[in-house]
Image: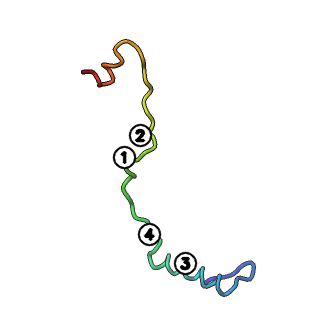
């Protein structure tokens, strides 16, 4: 049973709220547990580590031959 305590809703508004309540009662409101989001596209991956110039920096970068 739905009781309107304030205002005068239109028939369309009543139909909308009844539809939402019926869907929730039918089990449409169950939330499934999902896996945590993937980190491959995280914005932090786009941030470059700071460059540290100095003796041996070229070899430390991994580009040494």
Q: Toward which corner of the image does residue 16 lie, by quadrant? A: bottom right
Determine whether the residue tagged by mark 1 lies in a helix, strand or loop: loop
The residue at the point 47 percent across, 71 percent down is 29
Residue 15, image x and y in percent? 60, 85
Determine whether the residue tagged by mark 3 lies in a helix, strand or loop: helix
Between disc 3 and disc 1, whose residue precedes? 3
The residue at the point 42 percent across, 29 percent down is 49
Residue identified by numbered label 3? 20
Residue 52, image x and y in percent? 42, 20
Between disc 4 and disc 3, whose residue precedes? 3
Q: Is residue 60 left or right of residue 22?
A: left
Residue identified by numbered label 1? 40
Q: How is the image coloured?
A: rainbow
The residue at the point 29 percent across, 25 percent down is 62
Between disc 4 and disc 2, whose residue precedes? 4
Measured in 3D between alpha carbons, the distance from the residue under mark 4 to the one under mark 2, in whole angstroms, is 34 Å
Determine whether the residue tagged by mark 2 lies in a helix, strand or loop: helix
Q: Please state which of the two labelled residues, at mark 4 or mark 1, is closer to the viewer.
A: 1
Residue identified by numbered label 4? 30
Residue 30, image x and y in percent? 44, 69
Measured in 3D between alpha carbons, the distance from the residue under mark 4 to the one under mark 3, in whole angstroms, is 13 Å
* Residues tagged 3 and 1 counted as in contact (Cβ below 8 A): no
Q: Please state which of the two labelled residues, at mark 3 or mark 1, is closer to the viewer.
A: 1
Residue identified by numbered label 2? 45
Measured in 3D between alpha carbons, the distance from the residue under mark 4 to the one under mark 1, in whole angstroms, is 29 Å
* Residues tagged 1 and 2 counted as in contact (Cβ below 8 A): yes
Q: Please state which of the two labelled residues, at mark 4 or mark 2, is closer to the viewer.
A: 2
Quadrant of the snapshot with the C terminus: top left
Measured in 3D between alpha carbons, the distance from the residue under mark 1 to the one under mark 2, in whole angstroms, is 8 Å
Between disc 3 and disc 2, whose residue precedes? 3
Between disc 1 and disc 2, whose residue precedes? 1
């Amino acid at each position: 049973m739905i009781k309107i305590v304030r205002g005068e809703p239109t028939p369309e508004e009543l139909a909308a709220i009844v539809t939402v309540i019926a869907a929730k009662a039918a089990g449409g409101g169950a939330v499934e547990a999902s896996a945590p989001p993937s980190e491959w596209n995280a914005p932090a991956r786009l941030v470059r580590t700071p460059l540290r110039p100095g003796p041996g920096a070229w070899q430390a970068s991994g580009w040494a031959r």
